[in-house]
Amino acid sequence: MTADITTDMTTDQQTSRRRPLFRSGPVRAGGDRLLFLAEALRTFHTTGAPAPSGPGLVNALVVPVTSRPDRALSVLEVGAGTGVVTRRLARVLRPGDRLHVVEANPRFAERLRQDPELARRGPGIGLRLSPCRVEELPEGRPPAPDGGGPEGERYDVIVSGLPFTNFTPAQVRYLLDLHLRLLVPGGELTWFGYLGTTTARTLVAGPGRGARHRAVIRQLRSFEATYGLGSRTVWRNLPPPRVHLLRAPGGGDRGGGRGEHLPAPAATPAGGPTGGAATGGR
């Protein structure tokens, strides 16, 4: 069975080709966890975690969708991994909504293509998969010097699982700016990071990596201070993460109670909650 869902083959040479590619495939018990662990060992820099996200973390990440306004939504998931958050989004989105999933890891992208739940639900919610990095999307490319640039879809909600603390401060600033640029005015972004990553990174990788990690944290906190709506810690997830909710400038109060389930950020202890999610709430 092949569902009427499109996959965008987005590269520098090929940006508009689409072909039906979601299909039901065999799903083995524990297969997602084994695949995730294998990819974490092979490419931890871009995977960022040893296991998919737990139910509490998944629920916190999709709050802007579950506490939604009464209208159609366009949602972007950046870094879907094996699809833990993707499947949750597919369950809570309504007919007429759109879900665009971006996953650069080809093994994870193939797992998503064969997911039977996504193949079944995809046609009702306009599901798309782009097997690329978010910055490779046509609408994600930098504006031209004359102020022009590629036109593309903008999103009401972005759920990002990029492992920010694995990147440089400059990369983090670029990616967060890009996420905000891809949102409609007043659109909302959720992302998460694990507790205690600064201490762990310093002990394991040395003071140089620890200093880079702290610089990334400062960059993340700067964005939280400017655009943050709140954050919460999901203690039942191992390791415990802190989920952050940001809102793009403009748009006023978009209504629907969005963001109301994330309390104001608590004081952050030294070495505490920072970026570094898996590349997809996997």
Image (cartoon, rainbow, N blue to C red):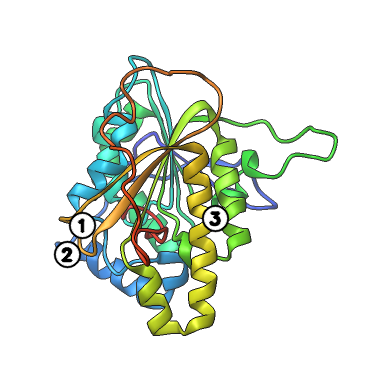
Within 10 Å of disc 3 (Cα), the crowding (few <14, some 14-19, many 20+) is some
As helix, strand or loop, the secondary structure at mark 2 comes to loop
Q: Is residue 66 at all visible to an observer of this figure? A: yes
99 above or below 253? below
Q: Which residue is mark 1?
A: 27
13 above or below 226? below
Callouts 3 and 2 close, C-beta under 8 Å: no
User: Where residue 133 sits in the image (x, y, percent)?
Assistant: 54, 54
Amino acid type at mark 2: Gly
Q: Choose the circle earlier in sequence order: 3 or 2.
A: 2
Badge number at residue 30: 2
- CA distance separating discs 1 and 2: 9 Å
Q: Quadrant of residue 109?
A: bottom left
The residue drawn where x is 40% and y is 53% is 161
User: Where residue 70 sits in the image (x, y, percent)?
Assistant: 33, 14
The residue drawn where x is 30% and y is 66% is 36
Q: Which residue is mark 3?
A: 219
Q: For the C terminus, give its image quadrant.
A: bottom left
Q: Marks 1 and 2: which is nearer the front?
A: 2
Q: Nearer the viewer, residue 270 or 5?
A: 270
User: Where residue 45 sits in the image (x, y, percent)?
Assistant: 46, 71
Q: For the N terminus, give its image quadrant.
A: top left
The residue drawn where x is 58% and y is 66% is 168
